[in-house]
């Protein structure tokens, strides 16, 4: 009988030791507000001319945040598109974006509570560009790095310029550059790094 009591007491002690030594899972207190870290973010597009010549351009000025209610907003300065050819920059600003009228583009999305968790999420977002507003959706991958949330496209996102009334502008650019074609479909690459605020 004493042996059984001793064994039960020993088992209980072992359980207490195991429970006390079990590593605690650190709960992540995810800040509710995030600000875009421009230095570690990028927004670029790929344009194709004459059916086979692909060129990468990138926006050098954009800002963004996610507010306390999970509303994401990115504001892009359309005058900041850098194609590495000054005359082409000017022509795009004047004839395509018409930045004298439409200086910025805005992307907004109402994020669900788990959309900033590590993993892949399908997110619907609104693009306000060239006087038109178009709903789109894409798969984004979220991961954490040095305390920041990094959001990247998980699958390619293809932008159709026709959805924003850019046909005339693209045709004007084509004629000015003596090209026989400029594609209306434009792949987009996005890397957004957010730091807690």
Image (spheres, grey):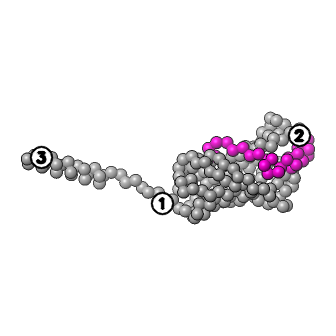
Looking at the image, which residue is at 35% across and 52% down? 23
Q: Is residue 175 magenta?
A: yes
Query: Which residue, given by chain and number where applicable, does mark 1 sit on?
Result: 29
Q: Nearer the viewer, residue 47 or 158?
A: 158
**Residue 148 in sight from this viewpoint:** no
Q: Nearer the viewer, residue 143 or 72?
A: 72
Q: In this view, which residue lies farthest toward the left?
A: 1
| Mark 1 secondary-structure assignment | loop
Label 1 – label 2 distance at C-alpha:
54 Å
Give above or below for 14 relative to 76.
above
Looking at the image, which residue is at 62% across and 58% down? 110
**Residue 142 in sight from this viewpoint:** yes
Precedes in sequence: disc 1 or disc 2: 1
Magenta span of residues: 153-178
Q: Left or right of 134: which side holds 142?
A: left
Query: Which residue, given by chain and number where applicable, does mark 3 sit on?
Result: 4
Mark 1 touches mark 2? (CB < 8 Å): no
Q: Point out residue 111 in the picture as x, y percentages from the top left corner.
A: 60, 56
Query: Which residue, given by chain and number where applicable, does mark 2 sit on?
Result: 179
Precedes in sequence: disc 3 or disc 1: 3
Give above or below for 122 relative to 101.
above
Mark 2 touches mark 3? (CB < 8 Å): no
């Amino acid at each position: 009988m004493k042996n059984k009591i001793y064994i039960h007491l020993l088992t209980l002690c072992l359980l207490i030791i195991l429970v006390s030594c079990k590593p605690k899972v650190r709960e992540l207190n995810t800040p509710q507000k995030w600000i875009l870290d421009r230095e570690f973010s990028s927004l670029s597009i790929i344009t194709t001319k004459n059916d086979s010549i692909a060129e990468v351009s990138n926006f050098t000025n954009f800002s963004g945040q996610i507010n306390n209610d999970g509303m994401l907003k990115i504001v892009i300065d359309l005058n900041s598109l850098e194609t590495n050819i000054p005359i082409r920059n000017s022509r795009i600003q004047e004839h395509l974006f018409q930045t004298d009228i439409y200086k910025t583009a805005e992307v907004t999305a109402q994020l669900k509570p788990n959309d900033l968790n590590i993993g892949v999420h399908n997110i619907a977002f609104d693009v306000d560009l060239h006087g038109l507003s178009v709903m789109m959706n894409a798969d984004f991958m979220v991961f954490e790095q040095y305390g920041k949330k990094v959001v990247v496209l998980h699958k390619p996102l293809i932008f159709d310029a026709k959805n924003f009334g850019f046909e005339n502008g693209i045709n004007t650019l084509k004629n000015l550059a003596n090209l026989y074609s400029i594609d209306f479909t434009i792949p987009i690459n996005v890397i957004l790094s957010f730091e807690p605020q």
